[in-house]
Image (cartoon, grey):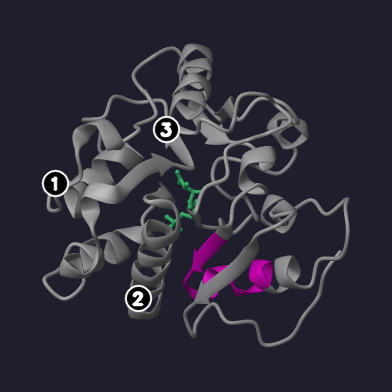
Amino acid sequence: MRALASHVVERARTAIRERGRFTFALAGGSTPKELYELLASPEFAPLVEWSRVEFFWGDERCVPPSSSDSNYRMAHEALLSHVPVPPSQIHRMAGELAPVTAAEGYNDELRRAFPGAQSPETPPSFDLILLGMGEDGHTASLFPGSPALRESKAWTCAVQKGDQWRLTLTFPVLNAAREIAFLVTGAAKRTMLENVLSAEAEGCPWPSAGVRPTQGRVTWFVDRDAAPQSSTGC
Ligand code: 6PG
């Protein structure tokens, strides 16, 4: 986790030096909490010019920001409430709104935050998008078999997973990123990680294998338990 924290700091410093700001989309779930706490720690927090950082989310559950299920709440408690980021630079997905309304609203938010992204053909290009991976190969809230996997224009979609609605960035945005950092831990994800890393071209059922930035790069941060021992694939 320290390696990823150092990597985030390095990418932030580079982006701020070269472009004046660092656009960073956070992952949800449980794994990143330790990373966010590390970034807020006395060891790492002084290394980042937080007033130049813009926070976004790769996905959110359709719940109020006060909910224990909220990805925003987890990031706020672990990181955002501990560092001096201007509130206007925290671009929260409005999980409390009706899903489709919230997705449309986030598309507007992205257009405002990324002046160069004004048409479906020019999606926002994040400096860094942090992603997790589920045991089923999902990432953000792009789940196997979901119609959202085929979305080629909208940058944010509302998706239903069981009885829960979620908001997610779509592949056009993920694959326009300068860098994607996957954070995957735990032996339960090892087999899927082997599948995703050895997946060939199109047609794979695992959404994480669909994250292939056209210009950017994908960096994997994997603990020993999740590290592949062999490779299989589709
Ligand atoms: C979410 C996440 C999701 C997560 C994976 C891994 O909202 O749940 O964005 O894509 O990254 O499910 O979750 P864990 O870190 O809890 O294993």
Q: Is residue 134 above or below residue 144?
A: below
Label 2 CB, ligand 1: below 8 Å?
A: no
Q: Residues within 10 Å of mark 3 (few under 14, many from 20)?
A: many
**Tag of residue 143:** none
Q: Residue at x 43, y 35 (%)?
A: 60
User: Going from the N terminus, do you reach mark 2 or mark 1 first?
Assistant: 2
User: Going from the N terminus, do you reach mark 1 or mark 3 first?
Assistant: 3
Q: Nearer the viewer, mark 1 or mark 3?
A: 1
Q: Is residue 204 above or below residue 227?
A: above
Q: Which residue does the numbered mark 1 point to in the structure image?
A: 81
Q: Residues within 10 Å of mark 1 (few under 14, many from 20)?
A: few
Answer left or right for 91 relative to 185.
left
User: Going from the N terminus, do you reach mark 2 or mark 3 first?
Assistant: 2
Q: Is residue 32 above or below residue 156?
A: below
Q: Which amino acid, by three-letter code, is at mark 2?
A: Ser
Label 3 CB, ligand 1: below 8 Å?
A: yes
Answer left or right for 60 relative to 233.
left
Q: Which amino acid, by three-letter code, is at mark 1?
A: Ser
Q: Which residue does the numbered mark 2 point to in the structure image?
A: 6
Answer left or right for 211 relative to 184.
right
Marks 1 & 3, CB-CB < 8 Å contact: no
Percent x, y of residue 4: 40, 73
What distance separates the C-alpha of mark 2 from that of mark 3? 28 Å
The magenta region covers: 180-193
Percent x, y of residue 29: 40, 50
